[in-house]
Image (cartoon, rainbow, N blue to C red):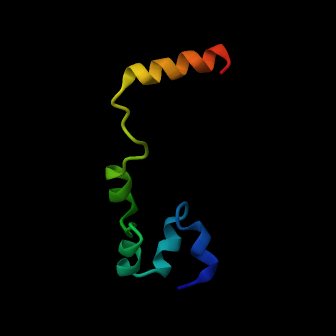
Amino acid sequence: MRSANWYYGHSNVKSYEGFTEEFLLSIGQTKNVEAFLATAQFQQTMNEPEVLALRWEELKAGF
């Protein structure tokens, strides 16, 4: 493991070469970045649109 790449793993695919697949899986990652990005959910689904609409109106009103 090369510590120089530790902080850039999220943005530099080449830095993943310094880690084993076993280690990456233990932290919820994989060397197959394309597959991970294709299946990743980057935000929580909001199932209450009326709450979202209310918060938006509050935001626009200056709350």
Residue occupying the far right of the picture? 62
Residue 6 in picture, x, y percent from top left: 58, 74
Question: What residue is drawn where x is 57% and y is 84%?
Answer: 2
Question: What residue is drawn where x is 35% and y is 73%?
Answer: 25
Establish if 29 lies above or below 20: above
Question: What residue is drawn where x is 35% and y is 80%?
Answer: 22
Establish if 41 lies above or below 52: below
Residue 26 in picture, x, y percent from top left: 37, 75
Question: What residue is drawn where x is 33% and y is 50%?
Answer: 38
14 and 54: which is toward the camera = 54
Q: Specify the quadrant of the image occupied by residue 11.
A: bottom right
Q: Is residue 32 left or right of residue 13?
A: left
Q: Is residue 56 left or right of residue 48?
A: right
Residue occupying the far bottom of the picture? 1
- Numbered disc total: 0
Say which quadrant the C terminus sits in: top right
Residue 16 in picture, x, y percent from top left: 47, 73
Q: Is residue 43 left or right of residue 1?
A: left
